[in-house]
Amino acid sequence: MKSEVVLSEEQLKCLASPVRAEVFEVVKLKGRVSARELSTSLGMSTQTIHFHLNELLKVNLIAVVERRAAKKKPERVFAASALSYRFPNITGQPDLEQVVLKSISATLRRVIRNFEAHAHDSENAQILKTVVCLSEADLAVFEKKIVEALEFARDQRDDNATPRDFTMLLHPRT
């Protein structure tokens, strides 16, 4: 698994679908998961899940990491292809900027829905917000530390613990 991937235009277009973005997020959250397990988790038909998984496979956002025995035929197990994903530099690329914005909007809608579902429970929903003013060199170090923290979380994974969404937006302030 790669540590970090800069999303391509094709990957961003794929993630502009709110349902596909949600399927992708659950694959990342669960680590390794089958279509049947995703269907149960998301309350969607396995046919719908298979369609979205195949679209994610086409653009290399996920990979088949195992084939398990099942009743009728072997079941594919999927995992994210990277630990973290980064948006590309969109400076001077208005078409790519629109694709990035659609992808971000799909993700934010899901984040907001999940946060609203848990906002009443302050033990389970936290907002951490700060403004950072860093040189480009220090910003690179900061981003590297975030990736290291995500790697730590992946390595310490406890499947019995309550899953937590970690969403971080780092952008220039206007």
Image: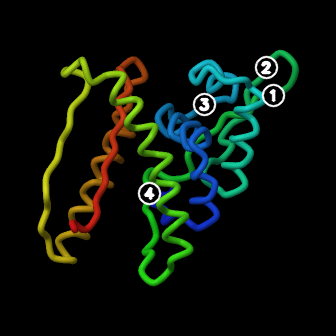
Please state which of residues 91 and 38 is positioned toward the viewer in this rendering: 91
Q: Amino acid at mark 4?
A: Ser
Side of 46 relative to 152 (left or right): right
Q: Which residue is mark 1?
A: 74
How packed is label 3: few (under 14 Cα within 10 Å), some, or many (20 or more)? Answer: many
Residue pictured at 47% horizontal, 60% vertical:
101
SS at mark 2?
Answer: loop
Residue flagged by tag 3: what amino acid is it?
Val
Q: Are marks 3 and 4 in contact (CB under 8 Å)?
A: no
- Residue 8 position, x and y percent, is 57, 67
Query: Would you call the spot at circle 1 few (<14 residues within 10 Å), some (14-19), or many (20 or more)?
Result: few
Disc number at residue 150?
none
Residue at 51% x, 77% y is: 94
Q: Which mark is residue 70?
A: 2
Q: Disc 1 on helix, strand or loop?
A: loop
User: Residue 149: horizontal and vertical position, in percent?
Assistant: 28, 48
* Disc 1 to disc 3, C-alpha distance: 14 Å
Q: Earlier in the sequence, mark 1 or mark 3?
A: 3
**Disc 1, disc 2: CB below 8 Å?**
yes
Q: Label 3's element?
A: strand
Dot 4 corresponds to which residue? 3
The residue where tag 3 is placed is: 33
The residues bearing labels 1 and 2 have C-alpha atoms spaced at a distance of 5 Å
Distance between the alpha carbons at the discs numbered 3 and 4: 19 Å
Q: Residue at x 34, y 27 (%)?
A: 116
Q: Amino acid at mark 1?
A: Pro
